[in-house]
Image (spheres, helix red, strand yellow):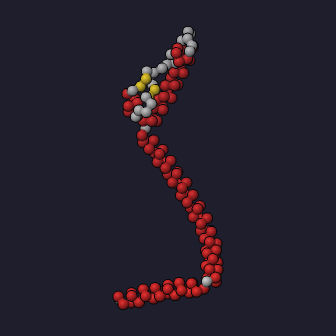
């Protein structure tokens, strides 16, 4: 049985094309078996094909197993992403001290080039901190 392409699982069972057997001359382009041994071989082949078809249909109909497979695939993807993120975090943590050192050197060089601006910004920060502390002290 061949399902109609694009049909849902339920509709596919109701709209099927007629089954083809291995005795169908148009399919195999040979004459039907003439002796008993050939006929038995054709029957065995047909049974094997039918068994495979039934197994495939049973697997498609087993929604619980398909959901379990989907769940396992999703868990595997999440684990892979988690391992990737952990590796990236380790690399970033290993690079952090070096990056902090580079930033400190840049800041030092900037202050040495223009100490007046740095002093003005530092003074403004100190004034803001003192003002906030003074306001909190008045509320208590």
The residue at 46%/29% (across/down) is 54
The residue at 64%/74% (across/down) is 102
Name the one closer to the observer, 115 or 99. Answer: 115
Corner quadrant of residue 58: top left
Corner quadrant of residue 8: top left
Q: Is residue 24 visible?
A: yes
Q: Is residue 114 above or below residue 29?
A: below
The residue furthest left is 139
Q: Is residue 70 above or below residue 22?
A: below
The residue furthest top is 34
Corner quadrant of residue 63: top left
In the picture, measured across the screen, residue 39 lies left or right of residue 14, that is: right
Name the spot of residue 72 as percent of width and height, x first: 49, 48
Q: Is residue 96 above or below residue 131?
A: above
Pick the quarter of the image with the N terminus. Answer: top left
Name the one closer to the observer, 104 or 94. Answer: 104
The residue at 52%/51% (across/down) is 77
Q: Is residue 43 visible?
A: no
Name the spot of residue 38 as percent of width and height, x first: 57, 14
Pick the quarter of the image with the C terminus. Answer: bottom left
Name the spot of residue 68 as percent of width and height, x first: 46, 45
Q: Is residue 48 above or below residue 63?
A: above
Name the spot of residue 88 as percent of width and height, x first: 58, 62
The residue at 56%/87% (across/down) is 119
């Amino acid at each position: 049985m061949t399902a109609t392409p694009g049909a849902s699982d339920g509709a596919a069972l109701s709209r099927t094309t007629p089954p083809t057997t291995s005795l169908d001359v148009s399919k195999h382009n040979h004459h039907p078996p003439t002796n008993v041994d050939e006929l038995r071989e054709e029957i065995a082949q047909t049974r094997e094909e039918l068994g495979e078809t039934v197994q495939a249909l049973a697997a498609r109909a087993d929604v619980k197993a398909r959901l379990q497979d989907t769940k396992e695939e999703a868990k595997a993807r999440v684990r892979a992403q988690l391992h990737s993120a952990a590796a990236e975090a380790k690399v970033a943590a290993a690079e952090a001290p070096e990056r902090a050192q580079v930033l400190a050197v840049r800041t030092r060089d900037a202050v040495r080039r223009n100490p007046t601006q740095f002093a003005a910004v530092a003074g403004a920060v100190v004034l803001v901190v003192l003002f906030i502390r003074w306001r909190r002290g008045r509320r208590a």
